[in-house]
Amino acid sequence: MLKERIEKHLKEQGNNIYMEEKEFAEKHQLLAEADANDVKNSDNRFADAYIERGDKETEEVLSQETAEFLNQPIEYFQKNKNEFMYLESNWFDLIGAEAVSFETDDVFGNYEVMLGLKLPKKSESAIKSFINENTSSGSAKYSLMFSQQDGLWDFNFSLNDIEGFKEDLTINEAYQLIYRYLFHLVSTVEEKRA
């Protein structure tokens, strides 16, 4: 569960946290008062992430990228519709999300997010409820399917539907928005199950 993973992270990493983890830790009384003021700049959350660009048709790796690549506008994927980006980060591991891919939809031109999510199968209604209540468009475009084989939810959604989305985001800002959305999804679903 998220609470246990954050508690473990705090013990191992100290105050190496960002706003989402800090607010969660305060809510669940996982932080000492003296620790409550330390928050890292979220611009650096994915500085040590593993990043690849790939070809959508062949899934061939085109290039392994550094964190500098994240400073480009998301428009990069409108101009390079044949590409997708794959990002692995310890921060996504913390919330139970497997590597997060990002691309532009060929048909509608929306920015699509694809990932595996570690939540129990019985969480389906809570996940769908969160998605439907937390989209700016009112009708979320998403795909959610549980894989018995790996015990993950295959979750695809349109970033364009998420509150805070703007066309002029950088890739880094888009991934921060994705992280925040997934963090709140996981914490909300787990609180409903508790």
Image: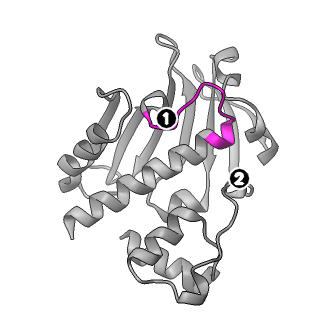
Q: Residue at x 22, y 54 (%)?
A: 123
Magenta highlight on residue 166? yes
Decide if residue 145 is in sight here: no
- Image quadrant holding the C terminus, namely bottom left
Residue marked by disc 2: 43
The local secondary structure at tag 2 comes to helix
Q: Residue at x 27, y 48 (%)?
A: 127
Q: Main secondary structure of the magenta part?
A: loop
Mark 2 or 1: the one toward you: 2
- For badge 2, the amino acid type reads Asp
Q: How many marks?
A: 2
Q: Which residues are magenta?
A: 162-173
Magenta highlight on residue 31? no
Measured from the top left, where is residue 134 in percent x and y? 34, 41
- For badge 1, the amino acid type reads Val
Measured from the top left, where is residue 86 in percent x and y? 61, 40
Residues at marks 2 and 1, CA–CA distance in whole angstroms: 19 Å
The answer to which quarter of the image holds residue 64 is: top right
Measured from the top left, where is residue 156 in percent x and y? 40, 35
Q: Residue at x 27, y 37 (%)?
A: 132
- Image quadrant holding the N terminus, namely bottom left
The answer to which quarter of the image holds residue 104 is: top right
Decide if residue 130 is in sight here: yes
Residue marked by disc 1: 113
Q: Residue at x 66, y 57 (%)?
A: 42
Q: From the viewer's perspective, is 35 left or right of 151?
A: right
Q: Earlier in the sequence, mark 2 or mark 1?
A: 2
Measured from the top left, where is residue 155 in percent x and y? 38, 40
Front position in the image: 47 or 149:
47
